[in-house]
Every structure is written in C-alpha cells, then in structure tokens.
C-alpha cells in the first residue's frame, strides 16, 4: 500500500513539473511575449514587376499575389495527410474572375531558384495538387512576359463565351 501511495505521489510530482515546464516553454500563447516587424516589401523586385504587368494586362480579372493554396484549394477526402500537400504552400499569383472571385488559374514566376532538384519536386507537387483541383497553372521564367502571352494564356483558360458584370458600368463585358 505504501508503494502504491509513493508511486501516486511521484506521478503527481512529475505532472506538476511537466506542467510548469510547458508553461515556461511557451504554454502562454500571448503575442505580447514576442516582437514583430513589418516585412517590406513582401515581394521580390521581379515579382513586383510581373505583378504590375499582370494587373495592366488582366484588367478584367482580379490578380492576387502570394496567396496561400489553402485559401482556394480543399481536399475532398477525410485523410489529413492530403492537406499537408498544400496547406503550407503559396502561389505567386492567383487570377480570379471579377464579380464571383472564382479562381481561374495560377501564375508562377520560376526564377533561378526553381532549377534545383528540391524546387522541381515542390513545383511538381504544386502542379499535381492544382491539376487535381481543376485549376490550370501557367509558368513564366521572366518578369518581362509579353502582354500577348499574358492575354493568350488568359484566353486559353477562360472560355470566350464567359463574361462578367462590370461593377463600374453595371454592364456585362467579355473577359477577352
């Protein structure tokens, strides 16, 4: 009986010590413990340059930079492992339909860093997830993409018959 009481007392002490250690290591999730700073700019110069070109070229669509894939892709099944394939990944640009915000396609700017084996594996995984979700991806290797290429890529994704409501004039316009 004394041994059982001693074991219970020992276990209680262990739980108390572990609880105290957890609190000391970060059990308090208050943001006041940390210092944060603004990250500016949050895009590289070549990404900013391409973004500006996309906004001008695709003025009948919305272009969003640096979008988390988890905001526009979802897994249909119940396996949690599948979510890990996209939950921590971002796309360079997400092109959405005006009026509905329906994702049309993704644009990736593949710079010099995309040549490594590791980057190619990441890109292929991203390609597979987007393909499975029915979201086309266009990859550019230069920030100076010709406007004709941008418009042809847009036209290849958006059916010519598709149109949206122009919020300014309240009239229907072709996306072309």
Image (tube, grey):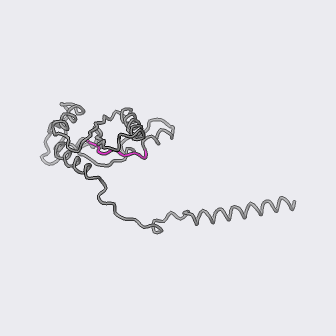
Residue situated furthest bottom in the rendering: 32
Viewer-closest of 147 and 167: 147
Q: Magenta span covers which residues?
A: 87-96
Q: Is residue 89 magenta?
A: yes
Viewer-closest of 119 and 124: 119
Q: Is residue 6 magenta?
A: no
User: Where does the image place residue 175, in percent across and percent down from the top left?
Assistant: 17, 37
- Looking at the image, residue 42 lies above or below residue 67: below
Magenta stretch: helix, strand or loop mostly: strand
User: Where does the image place residue 107, in percent across and percent down from the top left?
Assistant: 28, 40
- Looking at the image, residue 140 lies above or below residue 49: above
| Residue drawn at point x = 18 percent, y = 30 percent | 161
Q: In which image quadrant can residue 26 be found?
A: bottom right
User: Where does the image place residue 6, in percent across and percent down from the top left?
Assistant: 82, 62
Image quadrant in which the N terminus is located: bottom right
With 91 as the anchor, is 13 left or right in this view?
A: right
With 33 as the anchor, is 25 left or right in this view?
A: right
User: Where does the image place residue 53, in percent across and percent down from the top left?
Assistant: 19, 46
**Total marks in image:** 0
With 163 as the anchor, is 107 left or right in this view?
A: right
| Residue drawn at point x = 26 percent, y = 42 percent | 95
Image quadrant in which the C terminus is located: top left
Residue situated furthest right in the rendering: 1
| Residue drawn at point x = 24 percent, y = 42 percent | 142
């Amino acid at each position: 009986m004394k041994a059982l009481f001693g074991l219970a007392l020992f276990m209680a002490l262990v739980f108390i010590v572990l609880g105290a250690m957890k609190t000391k290591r970060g059990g308090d999730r208050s943001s006041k413990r940390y210092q944060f700073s603004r990250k500016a700019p949050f895009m590289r110069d070549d990404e900013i340059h391409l973004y500006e070109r996309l906004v001008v070229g695709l003025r009948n669509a919305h272009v969003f930079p640096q979008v988390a894939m988890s905001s526009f892709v979802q897994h249909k099944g119940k396996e949690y492992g599948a979510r890990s394939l996209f939950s921590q990944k971002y796309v360079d640009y997400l092109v959405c339909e005006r009026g509905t915000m329906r994702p049309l396609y993704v644009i990736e700017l593949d710079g010099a860093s995309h040549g490594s084996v590791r980057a190619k594996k990441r890109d292929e995984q991203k390609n597979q997830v987007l393909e499975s979700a029915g979201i086309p991806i266009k990859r550019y290797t230069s920030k100076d993409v010709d406007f004709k290429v941008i418009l042809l890529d847009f036209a290849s994704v958006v059916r010519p018959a598709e149109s949206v409501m122009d919020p300014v004039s309240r009239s229907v316009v072709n996306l072309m």
